[in-house]
Image (cartoon, rainbow, N blue to C red):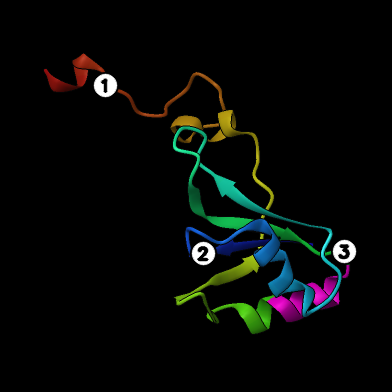
Amino acid sequence: MNIYVGSLHFKMSEAELKEIFEEYGEVSSAKVIIDKYSGKSKGFGFVEMPNEAEAKKAIEELNGAEVQGRKIIVNESIERTDRKRDFRGGDNDRRGGGGNRRDNYR
Protein backbone atom coordinates (compact mmCIF):
# COMPACT_ATOMS: atom_id res chain seq x y z
CA MET A 1 0.00 0.00 0.00
CA ASN A 2 1.27 3.46 -0.86
CA ILE A 3 0.97 5.95 2.01
CA TYR A 4 1.05 9.76 1.83
CA VAL A 5 2.85 11.50 4.71
CA GLY A 6 2.42 15.27 4.97
CA SER A 7 3.50 18.10 7.26
CA LEU A 8 6.96 16.59 7.67
CA HIS A 9 9.78 18.57 9.24
CA PHE A 10 11.83 19.99 6.37
CA LYS A 11 15.02 18.34 7.65
CA MET A 12 13.56 14.81 7.89
CA SER A 13 15.55 12.26 5.91
CA GLU A 14 14.20 9.27 4.02
CA ALA A 15 15.98 6.97 6.50
CA GLU A 16 14.18 8.65 9.42
CA LEU A 17 10.83 8.40 7.65
CA LYS A 18 11.40 4.72 6.93
CA GLU A 19 12.40 4.07 10.55
CA ILE A 20 9.13 5.56 11.85
CA PHE A 21 7.03 3.24 9.68
CA GLU A 22 9.17 0.14 10.29
CA GLU A 23 7.75 0.05 13.83
CA TYR A 24 4.50 -1.15 12.18
CA GLY A 25 5.94 -3.64 9.69
CA GLU A 26 7.96 -4.07 6.53
CA VAL A 27 8.66 -0.93 4.51
CA SER A 28 9.49 -1.37 0.81
CA SER A 29 10.45 2.27 0.29
CA ALA A 30 10.31 5.71 1.86
CA LYS A 31 10.65 8.85 -0.24
CA VAL A 32 10.79 12.48 0.89
CA ILE A 33 9.83 14.76 -2.01
CA ILE A 34 12.53 17.31 -2.84
CA ASP A 35 12.06 20.56 -4.76
CA LYS A 36 14.11 20.25 -7.95
CA TYR A 37 15.16 23.92 -7.95
CA SER A 38 16.08 24.52 -4.31
CA GLY A 39 17.08 20.95 -3.41
CA LYS A 40 15.08 21.24 -0.17
CA SER A 41 12.27 19.07 1.13
CA LYS A 42 8.73 20.02 0.16
CA GLY A 43 7.51 18.75 3.55
CA PHE A 44 5.80 15.59 2.36
CA GLY A 45 6.65 12.11 1.20
CA PHE A 46 5.46 8.60 0.47
CA VAL A 47 5.98 5.25 2.17
CA GLU A 48 5.30 1.91 0.52
CA MET A 49 4.30 -1.02 2.76
CA PRO A 50 3.57 -4.40 1.13
CA ASN A 51 1.33 -5.70 3.95
CA GLU A 52 -2.03 -3.90 3.84
CA ALA A 53 -2.96 -4.68 7.46
CA GLU A 54 0.34 -3.29 8.74
CA ALA A 55 -0.04 -0.22 6.50
CA LYS A 56 -3.56 0.49 7.78
CA LYS A 57 -2.38 0.18 11.38
CA ALA A 58 0.48 2.61 10.68
CA ILE A 59 -1.94 5.08 9.07
CA GLU A 60 -4.37 4.83 11.98
CA GLU A 61 -1.73 5.29 14.67
CA LEU A 62 0.56 7.83 12.97
CA ASN A 63 -2.03 10.22 11.53
CA GLY A 64 -1.90 13.28 13.80
CA ALA A 65 1.13 12.00 15.72
CA GLU A 66 3.84 14.47 16.65
CA VAL A 67 7.14 13.78 14.87
CA GLN A 68 10.09 16.16 15.24
CA GLY A 69 7.79 18.80 16.70
CA ARG A 70 5.15 18.64 13.93
CA LYS A 71 1.80 16.83 13.74
CA ILE A 72 2.06 14.70 10.63
CA ILE A 73 -0.74 13.83 8.24
CA VAL A 74 -0.82 10.19 7.21
CA ASN A 75 -3.33 8.60 4.85
CA GLU A 76 -3.60 6.17 1.97
CA SER A 77 -2.16 7.66 -1.17
CA ILE A 78 -4.62 7.86 -4.05
CA GLU A 79 -3.01 7.19 -7.40
CA ARG A 80 -2.93 10.31 -9.55
CA THR A 81 -4.49 10.20 -13.00
CA ASP A 82 -2.94 11.71 -16.10
CA ARG A 83 -2.27 15.42 -15.45
CA LYS A 84 -3.45 16.52 -18.90
CA ARG A 85 -6.88 15.10 -18.21
CA ASP A 86 -7.33 17.46 -15.26
CA PHE A 87 -5.96 20.53 -17.02
CA ARG A 88 -8.59 23.28 -17.28
CA GLY A 89 -11.14 21.04 -15.62
CA GLY A 90 -11.94 18.94 -18.67
CA ASP A 91 -11.03 15.60 -20.11
CA ASN A 92 -8.70 17.05 -22.74
CA ASP A 93 -11.32 17.60 -25.37
CA ARG A 94 -11.76 21.06 -26.88
CA ARG A 95 -15.12 21.83 -25.26
CA GLY A 96 -15.35 24.19 -22.32
CA GLY A 97 -12.76 24.59 -19.66
CA GLY A 98 -13.02 28.34 -19.27
CA GLY A 99 -10.45 30.73 -20.64
CA ASN A 100 -10.50 34.42 -21.49
CA ARG A 101 -12.83 34.86 -24.40
CA ARG A 102 -13.13 38.49 -25.35
CA ASP A 103 -16.67 38.15 -26.66
CA ASN A 104 -17.85 37.40 -23.09
CA TYR A 105 -17.10 41.00 -22.11
CA ARG A 106 -19.01 42.87 -24.86
Amino acid on which the number 3 mark rests in the picture: Pro
Numbered disc in front, either 1 or 3: 3
**Looking at the image, residue 29 lies above or below residue 36:** below
Question: In this view of the protein, which residue sits in the foreground, 66 or 90?
Answer: 66
Task: Find residue 26 and report its horizontal and vertical position in percent.
Answer: 86, 69
Q: Which residue is mark 2?
A: 8
SS class, disc 3: loop
Marks 1/3 in contact by CB < 8 Å: the verdict is no
N-terminal label among 1 and 3 = 3
Task: Find residue 62 and report its horizontal and vertical position in percent.
Answer: 63, 79
Is residue 56 one of those drawn in magenta? yes
Question: In this view of the protein, which residue sits in the foreground, 46 or 11?
Answer: 11
Disc number at residue 100? 1
Identify the magenta region.
Answer: 51-58
Amino acid on which the number 2 mark rests in the picture: Leu
Task: Find residue 51 and report its horizontal and vertical position in percent.
Answer: 88, 70
N-terminal label among 2 and 3 = 2
SS class, disc 1: loop
* Distance from Cα at disc 2 to Cα at disc 3: 22 Å
Task: Find residue 8 and report its horizontal and vertical position in percent.
Answer: 51, 64
Q: Residue at x 60, y 64 (%)?
A: 5
Amino acid on which the number 1 mark rests in the picture: Asn
N-terminal label among 1 and 2 = 2
**Looking at the image, residue 60 lies above or below residue 35:** below
Crowding around mark 1 (Cα neighbors within 10 Å: few <14, some 14 to 19, many 20+) is: few
Is residue 99 one of those drawn in magenta? no
SS class, disc 2: loop
Q: Which residue is mark 3?
A: 50
How many marks can you see? 3
Point out the image quarter for the C terminus: top left
